[in-house]
Image (tube, rainbow, N blue to C red):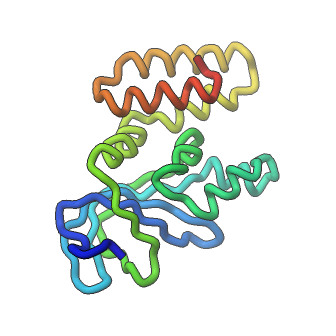
Amino acid sequence: MFGKGGIKPGEFIFVVQKDGEYNRIIIGRIQAVSGSKIRVTGTQIRPSGLIERVKAGKAGDRSRQVLASPDPNNCVFMLIDRVETSPFNADVDQAQDRVIWINENRYLVLDGWIKENLPEIFAAALTSAAEEDRQQAKAALREKMGSLYERDLKEHVYAVARSAKLL
């Protein structure tokens, strides 16, 4: 699955696991490899906001596609809505779960979204019912974006905010 050298401890991965009817993702660092089993330490993410929108019939085709088949390139659609996160330190099985190698920069960007609480801030800015609430959420988003210090994360957040017409 990972070419000639395979995967090694210390590398970063993006894992898609079935979570009932939908998927959850895990981002983390490989601690050990034993056959098809990989010990991962990181964060598991359940896209609760996107799942609720799909169940309510308010999600578009792209959102349903992302929920059915998340990958490191499209998971931002999960991360601009509410998510449930928790630490993850367990084995994943390459035979059952989809495991995708990601570089350290991609990991740091995805991890930064979670650590900086960006899903909640984006969700508030995109879904607030009252215009005043939406403007407050946009102001909070601009303030958060101004305080980010990691360059790749900051560029990524600005690009998503521009494409979502929040700036």
Q: Give percent across and percent down for residue 4.
A: 25, 75
Most foreground residue, 94 or 54: 94
Most foreground residue, 101 or 22: 101
Relative to 95, is 165 above or below?
above
Q: Residue furthest right?
A: 57
Image quadrant where residue 114 sits: top left
Most foreground residue, 72 or 141: 72
The total of numbered circles placed on residues is: 0
Image quadrant where residue 136 sits: top right
The quarter of the image holding the N terminus is bottom left
Is 78 on the left or on the right of 114, as rendered? Answer: right
Q: Give percent across and percent down for residue 57.
A: 81, 52
Image quadrant where residue 111 sits: top left
Name the residue located 26 percent from the left edge and 86 percent from the top edge.
Answer: 35
Relative to 137, is 117 above or below?
below
Name the residue located 61 percent from the left edge and 28 percent from the top edge.
Answer: 163
Is 112 on the left or on the right of 7, as rendered? Answer: right
Name the residue located 34 percent from the left edge and 62 percent from the top edge.
Answer: 101
